[in-house]
Amino acid sequence: MSSFLVNVLPKAHTYARSKCSIYGVNCMKAYSTNWEPKEPIVRTKTIPGPKSAELKSQLSAVQSTGTVQFFADYEKSTGNYIFDVDGNALLDVYTQISSVPLGYNHPRLLNIFKDENNLKTLINRPALGVFPGKEWPDKLNSILLNIAPKGLNKITTMMCGSCSNENAFKSIFLWYQTKIRGEKGFTAEEMNSCMINMPPGAPNLSILSFKGAFHGRTLGALSTTHSKYIHKIDVPSFDWPIASFPQYKYPLEDNVAENKKEDEKCLSEVQSLIEEYKKKDKPVAGVIVEPIQSEGGDNEASPAFFRALQKICKSNGVALLIDEVQTGGGSTGKFWCHEHFNLEYPPDVVTFSKKLQLGGYFHNDDFAPKEPYRIFNTWMGDPGKVILLEEILKVIKDEKLMANVEAAGKVLKQGLLNLESEFPQLLNSTRGRGTFLAVNCSNSKVRDSIVSTLRLNGIQTGGCGEVSIRFRPALIFKEAHANIVLDRFRNVLRSL
Ligand SMILES: Cc1ncc(COP(=O)(O)O)c(C=O)c1O
């Protein structure tokens, strides 16, 4: 038995005494080397259970805990199952807000830091912008540029999704001003005025974003986030343009003409806003868009919409930034969701984080500042996370996880469509790609009740937008897991 099994199985035993099958434990081989309970285990009447509640009260003494759902036991969590401190094992189709590519405690990731070189990389975290390690150029080339969106040959690494977008905006502003300035250096007036936040050194440029978008909570990114007021209230924002994002009618195949009109309406708004902000002397330097608006409600737009959006950007000299922080990493059936769109040109900038472990953005030479320290911070990413990413990418390849996403996604999506026709008064508008799926509920009260009842039935999902439930399983989520989710979902809907 591998040391992984020795560690996990005896502890798992206490969770599944009924139908013991392997080493006395009710578990299944969900993944070639990773063991899971055969089905969710729910031992408490409420989740959070008593131990979670106690920890929450301890934590509230030092930190705000309004967002804490329960306390997890990451030692026991395994594969697609997150274990909590009260002995519940939930089938996790939310995965830390779409951030766990290979499930919990994947044996190949557990092994990574047994290698002493990897351990030294982890503990000697460098200020990458000034003292990168000798392996860094090779790691960037062989790992990150290996997964770069087609047509983008440069990478800037960062920490999280928000700071990736934040720095990508800066890159776009620098690119825009460099186009105007040409080869000339900065003027004394620019250098002096930027120090007191005034033009021309601190120019009045803007980034266009979409209603319903989520691009992060740091100050600049927050001006492009419009999913929920609670993220924004009391915080000053830039006056930047906000266009409507398509709101489609489902099923798509029955509403083609209407949805096309919706695309056209939103695209013409983008063009008008670009013109309006030029007149206002706050020209749009870039447009930021999610391939699927996630926090805002899993709102999709068609490939034709994205192609037309890119055309508008090109014809107005505006950069197109595609935010793949949530969609990147394989769960839409392609490594980058925008690959589904057949764009005529590469996007100018693509940001990432979450499943890729560290944050950052891909771009081309035009978006790389020539002068030092213009895009910079202390860590600028984390080589320890890149080592994990390297192994994650190998596992995705070795285990053919992209094909797995396709197969499991088909089962989950068809099952959701079936539930939608069984319970039309409760569910509608199933949508998404791969396992990156969502369904709408009749109203937000019903949605919240379904999400919490599903949890009590052993399924961890997440809400998004006003009325949607989103599914964000790990890439190791299989058809068998999809069937468990669907069975329990049906029971919950029946009970309402
Ligand atoms: C599309 C998108 N962009 C940006 C972010 C912000 O990422 P982070 O929370 O890592 O700052 C998120 C987070 O959920 C996201 O979904």
Image (tube, rainbow, N blue to C red):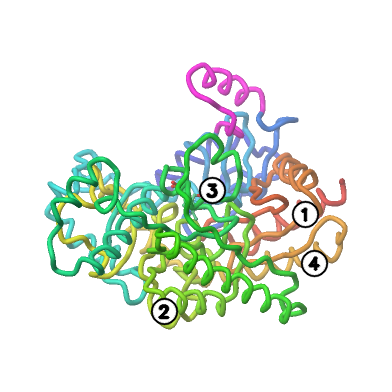
- Is the residue marked 2 within 8 Å of ligand 1, measured from its CB? no
**Earlier sequence position, callout 2 versus callout 3:** 3
**Earlier sequence position, callout 4 versus callout 1:** 4
Q: Badge 3 local density, few (<14 within 10 Å), some, or many (20+)?
A: some
Contact between marks 1 and 3 (CB within 8 A): the answer is no
Q: Residue at x 62, y 59 (%)?
A: 298
Amino acid type at mark 3: Ile
Contact between marks 4 and 1 (CB within 8 A): the answer is no
Any mark on residue 418, and which?
4
Q: Residue at x 47, y 46 (%)?
A: 222
Residue at numbered disc 1: 441
Contact between marks 1 and 2 (CB within 8 A): the answer is no
Any mark on residue 296, and which?
none
Residue at numbered disc 2: 315
Q: Badge 2 local density, few (<14 within 10 Å), some, or many (20+)?
A: few
Q: In the image, residue 490 lies at what x, y percent?
A: 81, 55
Splitting the image into 4 quarters, where does residue 124 fall?
Answer: top left
Q: In the image, residue 438 lies at what x, y percent?
A: 67, 59
Residue at numbered disc 3: 97
Secondary structure of the residue carrying numbered label 2: helix
Say if 309 sits above or below 446 in the image: below
Spatial distance from mark 1 to mark 3, Cα to Cα? 20 Å
Q: Badge 1 local density, few (<14 within 10 Å), some, or many (20+)?
A: many
Q: In the image, residue 179 lies at what x, y percent?
A: 25, 69
**Earlier sequence position, callout 4 versus callout 2:** 2
Residue 356 inside the magenta-drawn segment: no
Amino acid type at mark 2: Ser
- Residue 481 vs residue 125: left or right? right
Spatial distance from mark 2 to mark 3, Cα to Cα? 36 Å
Amino acid type at mark 4: Asn
